[in-house]
Image (spheres, rainbow, N blue to C red):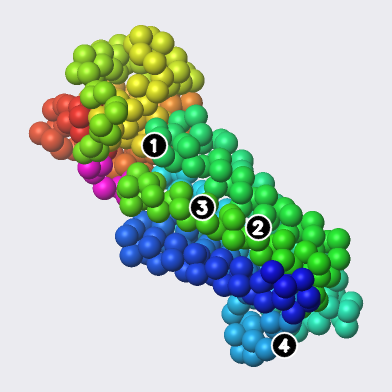
Amino acid sequence: MDATPAGTAAFDLFLRGGVVSLLALLAGRLLADHGRVTAARLGALFAVGSAAYTLCSLPGLHDRAGGWAGPLMALATANSFVFWLFACSLFDDAFRPRAWHGLAWLALAALGVTQRLVLVPGHHPAARVLGLCLDLQPLAWAGLAAWQALATAAADLVEPRRRLRLFIVAAAALHSIVTALATLAGPGPATGAAGGNTLLDAMGLLAIASVIAGSLLRVRGGQALFADACAPAPAVEAAPEVAPIDPTWTTALERAMRMDRAYRRDGLTIGQLAVELGLPEYRLRRLINQGLGHRNFNAFLNHYRLADAKAALGDRAQVEVPILTIALDAGFGSLGPFNRAFKADTGLTPGDYRRQALAEPSKTANPSLSASRISNPA
């Protein structure tokens, strides 16, 4: 490689071109294969934002970008926020984008364009303060994404997602932190100042983009990672090296849930349930995920808890029992999570469900019969 500044700049441009190409491939594959899934859409947007950052951090680009400078800067500035949303949607099947998420993205994008292109750094008193805030915000979003990955790891039943979550979050979060610290230490890359770290930055981006793209795209077309949590889970073919699920395990699990009502126990973990069933934890995870179609252990428990609550709400003998008592008896820790889970499952509040159920006795002879079948999760 040419050691002259021109040669270094050319190699830097070559590496960044590779990063942009990989990220464009990743975004295209996610949208083509899983465009209806929120996590895939956010992952594609994160890839596009990362490509925009790759271009924005190229020294001197802004002077030649013309009208593209604004959109590129908007995507690059708000990309750490998109990364947090991507982590939430990938690791939490119940996550749904809200209106305030879009407003927050627009606000960050507008601030980035204003600080970089309107309030020219060094020429406006507010530019330094605003720039400092924008330089630090990736640290906050990276921290929240890491917390999201750790907080939901124990209940995750999707093995490919369990293996990938920590690497994906750690790699991207590390780059966000390094970028923010490098920006605080000197002229930011987005300002167009050339610095000695631009080549290392490009190499780091290429390495991270390559590993993440390869990891995501090789997992059976992403079916395990980007399955639609609202759709019935398709049967998963076991890998040749994995032993088939023993029917006696399914029978034992069904007995524990339907007869012993293990879901009512406060703080029940998948490790505790595995010990009670005499199964290794990894086998129980595979049974619930691949055999029964559940992607999350808490959602698996809530399937039974909600069936229990529906039966109680539709029982005329329990018409005087408070809804809070029914929720606690079913295994929910408090009324708030119960109300949210119930509304998400039925579209009704528990009170409305009770009124409708008691008004139509012919439809509530045994409302938990179909809902509590272990082989047909909600």
Distance of label 1 from label 2 (alpha carbons): 29 Å
Q: Residue at x 10, y 34 (%)?
A: 362
Kind of residue indicated by mark 4:
Asp
| Residue at which label 2 appears | 204
Sequence-earlier tag: 4 or 3: 4
Magenta includes 229? Answer: yes
Residue 109 visible to the viewer: no
- Residues in magenta, as a range: 228-234
Q: Residues within 10 Å of mark 1 (few under 14, many from 20)?
A: many
| Residue at which label 1 appears | 158
The quadrant of the picture occupied by the C terminus is top left
Q: Residues within 10 Å of mark 3 (few under 14, many from 20)?
A: some
| Residue at which label 4 appears | 63
Magenta: main secondary structure:
loop
Distance of label 3 from label 2 (alpha carbons): 12 Å
* Residue sitting at the far left: 362
